[in-house]
Image: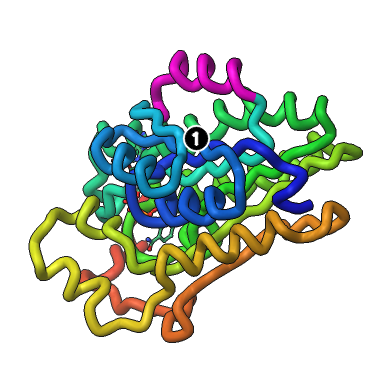
Amino acid sequence: MPFADYKTALVTGASSGIGAAVVERLSREGLEVHAVARSAEPLRALSERTGCIAHAVDVTNREALAELTGRIAFDVLINNAGVDRPKKFLEAEDGDIDLLIDVNLRAVLHLCRMVVPGMAERDRGHVINISSIAGNYNFGGNSTYHAVKAGVAMLSNQLRIDTFGKRVRVTEICPGRVATDIFNHVHGNDPSIRERFIDGFELPQASDIADAIAFAIAAPVAVNIGHMEITPTLQVMGGLQTAKPQTPAASSEGTKR
Ligand SMILES: NC(=O)c1ccc[n+]([C@@H]2O[C@H](COP(=O)([O-])OP(=O)(O)OC[C@H]3O[C@@H](n4cnc5c(N)ncnc54)[C@H](OP(=O)(O)O)[C@@H]3O)[C@@H](O)[C@H]2O)c1
């Protein structure tokens, strides 16, 4: 359907990384792009570069999102804003759990609630949800991030069922590691963080993810690209680990039944 059939797009998490690249790409395709993030200054620069309309808004601010989505009929919704607080779940902290649920899942659910019914009514629309390989595979890190991204994956499937019969397309993008500043946003600005996650690796760039999103949007209206997993060629998921116990197992001898 192509870009010519769509007029407006809403991109969350647009102040950096994948979101900013998507705004650049969709603006080039001629859409009126509304860019949402908390940081006003990078959004202002993005707006100058691309002509996008900047909204310095926190995605947890439901009233602000309701005002925006009530005012503009969005043809394309890109749920991209995301945060992480990686830690073993054994060390999980109260506020981290709430933050990930609020930004990575609750805001996605509410934006879909606000935007998708209008798409169904107009029989036209495309929702792109940026999840993560963490929504589909387990690896050491942060169980809350896995849990909320799995929620986004399941929501993406479900949206297609709930809009069945309408030309509302839903695409879940599952990135592996992408060369963005997310690692600095998560772990701090120490140069060792870039060395650990970016420098010396061959990684997809944010613009590669934006190109994949543009491909899904540009497909004919009869085509729904439901799921794209995009990883570095030199990254794999999975593996098998078997641990030896650190302490002997408790003897069952003498225990009461
Ligand atoms: N890079 C990767 O390796 C990777 C891999 C898998 C999945 N992803 C997913 O891809 C998406 C984009 O990540 P990225 O790599 O581009 O990271 P990034 O550069 O850190 O960008 C994250 C964006 O989210 C915005 N954001 C965070 N909290 C927000 C809030 N409360 N309200 C509004 N905006 C908020 C940030 O803007 P402000 O701080 O200005 O609000 C920023 O624009 C995320 O959902 C992430 O989980 C990334």
Can you identify the residue that label 1 sits on?
A: 34
Determine which quarter of the picture holds residue 112: top right
In the image, taking residue 256 as reference, residue 117 lies left or right, namely right
Query: Is 67 included in the stretch rendered in magenta?
Result: yes
In the image, taking residue 162 as reference, residue 8 lies left or right, namely left
Kind of residue at disc 1: His
Q: What residue is drawn where x is 79% and y is 52%?
A: 1
Q: What residue is drawn where x is 57% and y is 58%?
A: 173
Q: What residue is drawn where x is 48% and y is 48%?
A: 23
Range drawn in magenta:
59-72
Query: Where is residue 257 shown, x and y percent of the image?
Result: 44, 49
- Nearer to me, 10 or 108: 10
Residue 233 visible, this angle: yes
Q: Is residue 201 above or below residue 6?
A: below
Query: Where is residue 31 shown, x and y percent of the image?
Result: 60, 43
Residue 101 visible, this angle: no
Q: What residue is drawn where x is 77% and y is 44%?
A: 5
